[in-house]
């Protein structure tokens, strides 16, 4: 008697690699690595969230509301990590996944070394500029109403954060390197260990009079430890070889920055298109309604984050499979990913809507009235967003970038003015509905014009990722 589900779980949890000399072996190995990554990522997210929650509670108790708010404001700048590396980290994922893992060839080691060299230079420059700004720029505009010792402490914490941010850029690239090698579970396991250590440290120091600078060091500083440990792993595996850069010209870095710029544009477009909705609400409807909108955003993270975690390894899986001609595995993976994301997001969002008042009360503490229309609108957008993310992982792995840039560009041009127009007239519930309508319309047009042909060309096995992508990108 066979037990296919048990067999599949065994393949995922298996620690010993499969033989990759055959197409079947490569497919099993990709699934094994993806499964380990998903499990480790989920545990790492839970551990990190728990530690941040613990740190926030202890900081609020020991520092008070004002200094706690300063720390939270500084921590908000972590989002700069997505932009300061100019997209180089994301741009490395596909090439590394497609490159040869054979040490003798040196292809993968050279790619990794070039990427780290580029982000090291960017990190040094960014860290220096941010530190100079933190030391010299007036901070009254950032910390309104804060003066005296609190403002001086905020400036110290900000320049320490700026230094750590510059250091973190090449370390963040190391995390993306492991994603490209389909071994992101390594960095996630190290992150879990770091989170446990940080929790123990916070509990041990809970009765100390920690400053804002201390909390910046303990929280953001500790986030760099997994990257440092991963760097040691890469050096031990001879994946970082400065000798491979001997004779390298600056022109050879141009494709790396070009691909990085494309991913940077996608990130910026997503941030402008739907990442700034809460700011629009605050500006046009006031902080009170912005708080209502923020509650809905956080509630539906219960549906989106698990599916983001599940789909994240697929980027490298697709790139690796396409390069090696394992198209059956690509088609199967894409079908399961799209249908799984659609069904999974639909089920989770339906459950959230059914339990809406109870879930809302948990997140709002009973201080904000339940917004049923907003919840339904967010459920629709979350289902579309999760399914679109599954498709984006395939497009990134296949290096089909230009249609994505076109989709995001048209979406931003249409969505922002329409959202501004409807917020004042129809309220905040109209924002997710407008996002759904414009995104689906834009995607449908781009799919008909160019995306469909590029996808079919890849899935048919008639072209590699490099031949499909526009050389300009």
Image: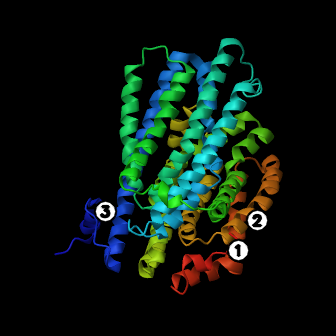
Q: Earlier in the sequence, mark 1 or mark 3?
A: 3
Quadrant the C terminus occupies: bottom right
Q: Residues within 10 Å of mark 1 (few under 14, many from 20)?
A: some
Q: How crowded is mark 3: few (under 14 residues within 10 Å), some or many (20 or more)?
A: many
Residue nearest the observer in this picture, 163 or 24: 163
Q: Can residue 380 be seen in this view?
A: yes
Residue on which the image places disc 2:
410
281 vs 333, left or right, is: right
Q: Which residue is drawn at 71% across and 80% down?
A: 449
Q: What element carries label 1?
A: helix
Residue 348 visible in the picture: no
Query: Which quadrant is the N terminus positioned in?
Result: bottom left
What residue is shown at x 66% (from left), y 36% (from top)? 128
x, y percentage for residue 164?
56, 35
In front of the other: 245 or 92: 245
Q: Name the residue under label 3.
A: 12
Q: Are marks 2 and 1 in contact (CB under 8 Å)?
A: yes
**Percent x, y of residue 422:** 80, 52
Q: Is residue 359 above or below residue 101?
A: above
Secondary structure of residue under mark 3: helix
> Going from the N terminus, do you reach mark 2 or mark 1 first?
2
Which residue is denoted by mark 1 in the rendering?
A: 446
Q: Residue at x 42, y 79 (%)?
A: 326
Residue 413 in the figure: left or right of residue 122: right
Residue 30's image quarter?
A: bottom left
Estimate the x, y position of residue 225 in percent, counting from the top left. Answer: 44, 39
Marks 1 and 3 sit apart, C-alpha to C-alpha, by: 36 Å
């Amino acid at each position: 008697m066979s037990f296919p589900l048990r067999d599949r779980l065994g393949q995922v949890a298996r620690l010993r690699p499969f033989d990759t000399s055959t197409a079947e072996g490569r497919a099993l190995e990709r699934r094994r690595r993806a499964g380990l990554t998903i499990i480790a990522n989920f545990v790492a997210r839970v551990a990190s969230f728990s530690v941040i929650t613990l740190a926030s509670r202890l900081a609020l108790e020991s520092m008070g509301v004002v200094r706690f708010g300063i720390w939270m404001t500084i921590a908000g700048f972590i989002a700069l990590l997505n932009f300061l590396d100019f997209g180089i980290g994301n741009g490395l994922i596909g090439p590394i996944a497609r490159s040869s893992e054979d040490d003798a060839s040196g292809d993968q080691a050279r790619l990794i070394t070039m990427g780290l060299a580029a982000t090291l230079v960017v990190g040094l420059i960014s860290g220096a500029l941010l530190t100079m700004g933190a030391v010299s720029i007036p901070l009254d505009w950032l910390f309104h109403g804060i003066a005296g010792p609190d403002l001086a402490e905020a400036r110290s914490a900000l320049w320490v954060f700026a230094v750590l941010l510059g250091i973190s850029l090449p370390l963040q690239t190391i995390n993306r390197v492991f994603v490209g090698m389909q071994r992101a579970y390594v960095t996630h396991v190290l992150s879990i260990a770091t989170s446990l250590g940080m929790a123990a440290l916070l509990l041990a120091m809970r009765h100390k009079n920690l400053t804002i600078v201390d909390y910046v060091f303990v929280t953001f500083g500790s986030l760099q430890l997994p990257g440092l440990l991963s760097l040691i792993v890469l050096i031990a595996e001879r994946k970082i070889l400065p000798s491979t850069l001997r004779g390298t010209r600056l022109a050879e870095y141009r494709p790396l920055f070009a691909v990085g710029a494309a991913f940077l544009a996608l990130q910026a477009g997503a941030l402008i298109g739907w990442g700034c909705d809460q700011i629009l609400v605050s500006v046009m409807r006031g902080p009170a309604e912005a708080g209502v909108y923020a509650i809905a955003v956080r509630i539906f993270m219960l549906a989106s984050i698990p599916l983001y975690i599940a789909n994240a390894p697929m980027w490298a899986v697709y790139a690796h499979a396409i390069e090696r001609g394992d198209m059956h595995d690509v088609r199967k993976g894409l079908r399961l990913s799209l249908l799984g994301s659609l069904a999974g997001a639909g089920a989770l969002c339906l459950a959230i809507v059914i339990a809406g008042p109870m879930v809302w009360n948990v997140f709002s503490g009973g201080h904000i009235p339940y917004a049923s229309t907003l919840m339904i609108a967010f459920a629709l957008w979350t289902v579309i967003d999760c399914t679109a993310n599954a498709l984006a992982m395939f497009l990134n792995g296949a290096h089909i970038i230009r249609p994505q840039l076109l989709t995001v560009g048209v979406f931003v041009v249409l969505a922002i003015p329409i959202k501004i127009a409807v917020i004042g007239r129809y309220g905040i519930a109209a924002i997710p509905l407008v996002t759904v309508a414009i995104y689906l319309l834009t995607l449908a047009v781009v799919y008909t014009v160019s995306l469909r042909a590029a996808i079919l060309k890849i899935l048919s096995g008639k072209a590699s990722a490099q031949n499909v992508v526009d050389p300009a990108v």
